[in-house]
Image (cartoon, rainbow, N blue to C red):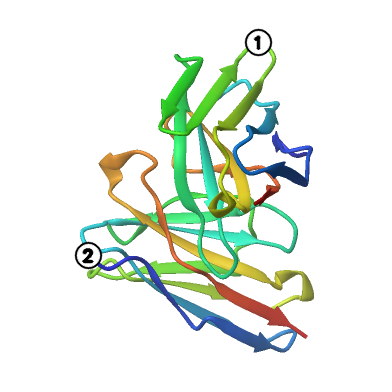
Amino acid sequence: ETGVTQSPTHLIKTRGQQVTLRCSSQSGHNTVSWYQQALGQGPQFIFQYYREEENGRGNFPPRFSGLQFPNYSSELNVNALELDDSALYLCASSLVDMGYGYTFGSGTRLTVV
Amino acid sequence: DQQVKQNSPSLSVQEGRISILNCDYTNSMFDYFLWYKKYPAEGPTFLISISSIKDKNEDGRFTVFLNKSAKHLSLHIVPSQPGDSAVYFCAASANAGNMLTFGGGTRLMVKP
């Protein structure tokens, strides 16, 4: 069974630009969550998608948005990038009835300059 | 306001000895707690969890203890092995919600 894959692995963007990060869920998983991990800190919950709809959101502004596709893959979009958006972005997939059985991807390292 | 705190950024232990990683929380609504391990360039991997109705959960070399009155949990690794060297995150959730709140992590180094 394949795990969670994220692309790209590294990305450099300029302040004010927009970025799209991608995630392929583990086979059989129908729920995807996104987390932001700043340097030296723990991951922070951005939002979760289930059945292509947002199913919970953390304390992030609306310029952070997402999509989940029928094949359960997902995108995280960030508009108007700020320097503080520089972080590791982690995608985690799960089955909705598996509780907290998340499988995390290796993440995308975003640097905003 | 950090609701989950890991006050020790790093811990060094000799191989074969016990590693004890600590975590404190402030939100009384948290009812499920998890530990994740993270190697460099990899995502966090689930290690062990505990529900608030229990005070101990054991899985092989790993045991998690929960003290609800003190709002404190700890992860014990016995015996510690060099392969256990990683960053360990404590995480918590409230009311079977879908959001995990993580601590800042503790870097464990197990010396051969």
On the image, which quarter does residue B26 sit in? top right
Q: Looking at the image, is A41 positioned above or below residue A107?
A: above
Classify 10 Å Cα crowding around label 1: few (below 14), some (14-19), many (20 and above). Answer: few
What residue is shown with label 1? B69
In the picture, the quarter occupied by the N terminus of chain B is top right
Nearer the observer, A101 or A66: A101
Asked if disc 1 and disc 2 are in contact, CB closer than 8 Å, the reply is no
Nearer the observer, A22 or A107: A107
Identify the residue at horizontal 50%, vertical 55% (top origin).
A47
- Badge number at residue A1: 2
* Secondary structure state at the residue bearing disc 1: loop
Q: Amino acid at mark 1?
A: Ser
Do callouts 1 and 2 point to residues on the same chain? no
Say which chain tag 2 marks: A
> What percent of the width, then of the height, locates residue B102?
61, 44
* Secondary structure state at the residue bearing disc 2: loop
